[in-house]
Amino acid sequence: EVPRGTTPADIAAAIGPGLAKAAIAARVDHGSGAELRDIGRPFEGDAQLALVTQRDEADALELARHDFAHILAEAVQKLFPGTQITFGPSTDDGFYYDFAPAPERGAFTDEDLPAIEAEMRRIIADDQPLVREVWSRADLIERWSQQGESFKAEWASELPEGEELTVYRAGSGEDAWLDMCRGPHLASTGK
């Protein structure tokens, strides 16, 4: 038994410092099937737990590719303000993100890639925490609309009523970057 609010990271730390350092995610089963989750997401009730480390290559690679997709989107939006993002999943052999560049910008070219890669490396080096947040549909649609993110606002409005809407925040304060996502993610951009 553990107190309410306990996370898989807490369990790993209780087992030992080596596992606490090695654990990158968790496979949690509340009785309806196992789900890969963030290492810092608290349990909602009774569950079976399997801690995921880099030795679990398929899960670790999926998490890293998913994080790289988000880091790519953040880098592009920081370098090219006005760019809208849509979806950015990992794939069997990498990751991608769909972009809608600002009309005055035009399409991205191969010449943009070195700057994007450099910005991605900077974001990784900053090692910002990736924090899962649950938002109300109305607040999420309002935020995306205010930021000119019409694709995200439309997507949020089309999700089924009653579905939990989650975002991941990279960093904190005014410079925090936010994207709607089910997750899971690693604990930080540096991981």
Image (cartoon, rainbow, N blue to C red):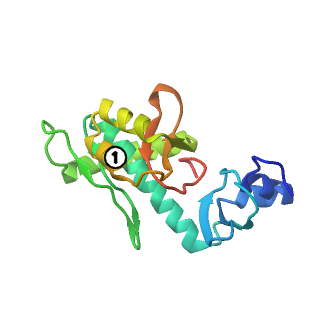
Q: Is 171 on the left or on the right of 95, as rendered?
A: right
Label 1 sits on what residue type?
A: Ser
- Number of marks present in the image shown: 1
Q: Is residue 116 above or below residue 18?
A: above
Residue depicted at x 43% and y 34%: 139
Q: Residues within 10 Å of mark 1 (few under 14, many from 20)?
A: some
The answer to which of 115 and 20 lies nearer the viewer is 20
- Could you say where residue 36 lies in the image, as x and y percent from the top left? 59, 65
Q: Is 82 on the left or on the right of 176, as rendered?
A: left
Q: SS at mark 1?
A: helix
Residue depicted at x 34% and y 37%: 144
Q: Is 149 on the left or on the right of 48, as rendered?
A: left
Q: Residue furthest top?
A: 174
Q: Is 21 on the left or on the right of 79, as rendered?
A: right
The answer to which of 73 and 133 lies nearer the viewer is 133
- Could you say where residue 68 lies in the image, as x and y percent from the top left? 44, 55
Q: Quadrant of residue 48?
A: bottom right
- Could you say where residue 1 lies in the image, as x and y percent from the top left? 87, 58
Q: Is residue 30 above or below residue 84?
A: below
The answer to which of 126 and 137 lies nearer the viewer is 137
Mark 1, residue position: 157
- Could you say where residue 164 lies in the image, as x and y percent from the top left? 51, 50
Q: Quadrant of residue 97?
A: bottom left
Residue depicted at x 24% and y 47%: 112
Residue depicted at x 47% and y 33%: 176
